[in-house]
Image (tube, helix red, strand yellow):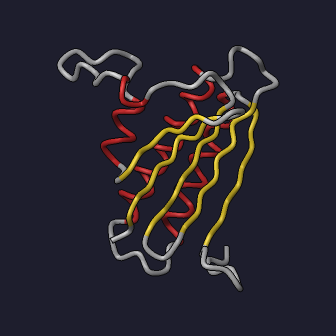
Amino acid sequence: MELRAPMCDTFIHVDVVIPTQTKYLALIASIGERIAKELDNFTGDREALSYQLNLVLTEATVNVIKHACEDDIKNCVRVTINLQEDALNIKVYDYGQGFDLEAVPLPDLDHPGESGMGLFLIRSLMDSVTYTQHADYNVLEIIKYLK
């Protein structure tokens, strides 16, 4: 895997579109793991970053599959990952009705359930998380600064 693309500011650009089926979660997670392990100038804990990216990409994709595909197997999930010099920018696109990120309640950490932890984990592990709604799609944007 070559990490520096010629003639552009982005070192890595990945654009993946998968069907809204959980059997593709391992593929999405492995892309994040591989990127973390291949970073040339990253001096932090690669194993920790690899685990974080695996978890974040899996949780974000699961949320689209569970909440945004409206039981239509024809729907898809698009994930883009852009690695720039000092940040990793992940965008997860969905084509559902959307939601208000700020209205999602914090999970009950004293009595955690089987679901409801995904956004909490994403927000806890990453540096910036936003969700924007557009006319035909929505975007969960996740940023991790590489210090």
**Can you tell which quarter of the image residue 107 is in?**
top left
Locate residue 111, reporting x and y percent. 22, 15
Q: Residue furthest left?
A: 110
Q: Residue furthest front?
A: 135
- For the image, the number of numbered tags is 0
Quarter placement of the C terminus: bottom left
Q: Residue furthest bottom?
A: 7
Residue at position x 44%, y 55% from top? 143
In this rendering, position of residue 90 left or right of residue 116: right
Q: Which of 88 and 52 is in front in this view?
A: 88
Quarter placement of the N terminus: bottom right
Residue at position x 56%, y 46% from top? 29
In this rendering, position of residue 116 left or right of residue 19: left
Residue at position x 34%, y 47% from top? 125
Is the residue 64 above or below the residue 9 in the image?
above
Residue at position x 58%, y 20% from top? 67
Locate residue 19, reporting x and y percent. 76, 33
Locate residue 9, reporting x and y percent. 60, 78
**Can you tell which quarter of the image residue 47 is in?**
bottom left
Is the residue 109 above or below the residue 49 in the image?
above
Locate residue 42, reporting x and y percent. 41, 75
In this rendering, position of residue 32 left or right of residue 19: left
